[in-house]
Image: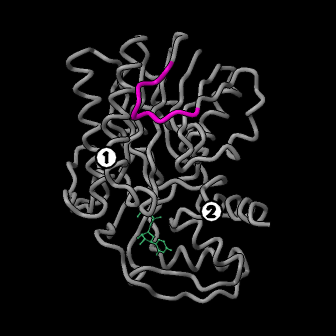
Amino acid sequence: MNILVTGAAGFIGSHLTEKLLNDGNRVIGFDNLQTGSKDNQKNFINNENFSFVEHDITEPLPVEEKIDQIYHLACPAAPIHYQKDPIKTLTTAFIGTKNVLDLARRFGARILYTSTSEIYGTPLEHPQHENYWGNVNPIGLRSCYDEGKRAAEALCFAYNRQHLTDIRVVRIFNTYGPRLAQNDGRVMPNFINQALKGEPITLYGTGDQTRSFCYIDDNVRGLIAMMNQDNFLGPVNIGNPAEITMRALAENIIRLTNSKSQITYHPLPQDDPHRRKPDITLAKEKLNWEPNVSLEEGLIKTINYFKYASS
Ligand code: UDP
């Protein structure tokens, strides 16, 4: 198949592209390299079935050859990145998604939109099921991302209703693994780098807030399963329901790296969700998908990558 991936130089986009190429597809990758990096494409940059276009999706995408499927991932996803230029984040989420939907419409291609657990905001229901409408601060620091992604979900469904565009919508929960950007300020790269260097671990707030971390290989398998089924449009949660406090995560990383780092406490960022855990009943039922990499196993692989990447 001819598959287009937006965000193909990003963390998830590069792993997805690699898997699609290994499965024998032709992939055209788009990325403006705002947060992605060509380093992430080292394993497949010379693959004859891969081509790369450096392009910002807020402008219509220049594509001539027929596309069968589109995985639309392009958007900064780390809080410090998406908050740096909030207007750009909203524009990428909405105008960018509109341009990608127009492309899907032009070719009659199926488009999978990667939304986010952030659309649930600071959730009042736990775990988060797809039927939950969320609790988002519409004007807070995170709103450029949360509301941008919510509007883009709405746009996908509007295209489906008005133009019969063949959409799939996935809500991705925290995902981690090799190729996470070292400097994006998120908890995994921060804690792992700090532990490896013996520096203080920067725990925000009390450390009682939770997240649920999905290993990248499980995530990619979930995205591909959702794209290639004909039963439902979504949205569907793709994440690992194993919930952990940020303090316990810090302790685990200190243990696995044999680090002498101490935990230090810092202010909690505004609107930082207190709890997050996906209900994955729907993914199990409709996609026969569930994660199978444990946090321990995934952390060991990720720590090994960071050791090598920072040496
Ligand atoms: N966090 C932390 N220390 C850090 C970075 C993040 O304690 O150095 C916390 C953050 O406050 C949040 C959680 O880790 O509760 C996950 O943050 P991240 O930025 O990775 O992603 P989010 O899920 O909030 O989008």
> Is residue 243 shown in magenta?
no
Magenta segment's dominant SS is: loop
Which label is found at residue 182? Answer: 2
**x%, y% of residue 53?**
59, 29
Q: Quadrant of residue 52?
A: top right
Where does the C terminus fall, quadrant-wise?
Answer: bottom right
Q: Residue at x 51, y 67 (%)?
A: 185
- Residue 192, how many percent across, how many down? 63, 71
- Mark in front: 1 vs 2: 1
Q: Nearer the viewer, residue 145 or 222?
A: 145
Front-most of 75 and 241?
75
> What type is the residue that disc 1 sits on?
Leu
Q: Which residues are magenta?
A: 54-62
* Residue 133 on image: x %, y %: 20, 48
Q: Nearer the viewer, residue 177 or 190?
A: 190
The residue carrying mark 1 is: 90
Q: Amino acid at mark 2?
A: Gln
Mark 1 nearby-residue class (10 Å; few <14, some 14–19, many ≥20):
many
